[in-house]
Image (cartoon, rainbow, N blue to C red):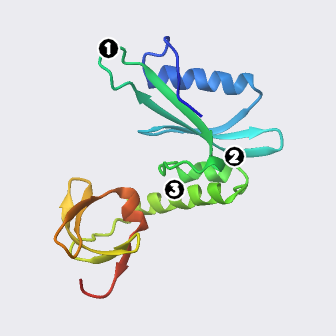
Amino acid sequence: MGWDSCLNWKNKKDALQDLVQSMIKSGWIILGEASTRQGAYYAIKNGNDSFIYCAMVKRSPRAKDFKVYVKTFSESCGPYMNDCPIELFKLVKEPSNTYAEDFRARCVAFANLKTNPVDLTGKTISLYGKIYRVIGKVKRSYLIEDGTSKCYRMTKNQEMSATILESEF
């Protein structure tokens, strides 16, 4: 499960067009698709099976080649991304395993977080078994501190995993 690249790909659009052509040649039927910042998601029908297919797209960090790289996988692999539009879930069957269920649950939570944001500033949270106090917001993430006055930046994925506590820090 490595990264694929092609010298003909100049940008994300080229890479995803090639990917779609190869899916169609394989006999897959594309029921729906959505492009996101990280890549693209496809609702796929393959025989009696239907599922979400993910494609991450990145550019080479080296200034010389600027190659475009693509990594593809099914939702059953449990991708770490969480920005799949939930409308695509309606086009496919229920998840086939716990990895796919977890992936869909994270995408629904992310969509809810985007539509119903909660201000965590000043709140006490539990994250990965530790207690933190949310100091404030820095751009699109929160600044949190533990009991030793060490500060950390909380990502969106961590924000979805955090539990707001009623008790004081």
Q: What is the quadrant of the C terminus in the image?
A: bottom left
Query: Neighbour class for label 3 at 10 Å: few (<14), some, many (≥20)?
Result: many
Q: Is residue 134 left or right of residue 105?
A: left
Residue, far bottom: 167
Say which element carries label 3.
Answer: helix
**Nearest the camera: 73 or 84?**
73
Q: Residue at x 32, y 69 (%)?
A: 118
Residue, far left: 149
**Is residue 98 placed above or below 59 in the rendered structure?**
below
Query: Within the image, what quadrant is residue 157 found in?
Result: bottom left
Amino acid type at image mark 1: Lys
**Nearest the camera: 145 or 166?**
145
The dot on residue 51 is: 2
Query: Neighbour class for label 1 at 10 Å: few (<14), some, many (≥20)?
Result: few
- Lower position in the chain sequence, tag 3 or tag 1: 1
Q: Residue at x 38, y 61 (%)?
A: 158
Query: Within the image, what quadrant is residue 23 found in?
Result: top right
The dot on residue 64 is: 1
Q: Is residue 62 left or right of residue 76?
A: left
Query: Neighbour class for label 2 at 10 Å: few (<14), some, many (≥20)?
Result: many
Q: Is residue 45 left or right of residue 2?
A: right
- Lower position in the chain sequence, tag 1 or tag 2: 2
The span from disc 1 to disc 2 (Cα, nearest Å) is: 37 Å
Question: What percent of the width, then of the height, locates residue 134?
Answer: 23, 71
Look at mark 3 in the image and give the residue it sits on: 107
Say which element carries label 2.
Answer: strand
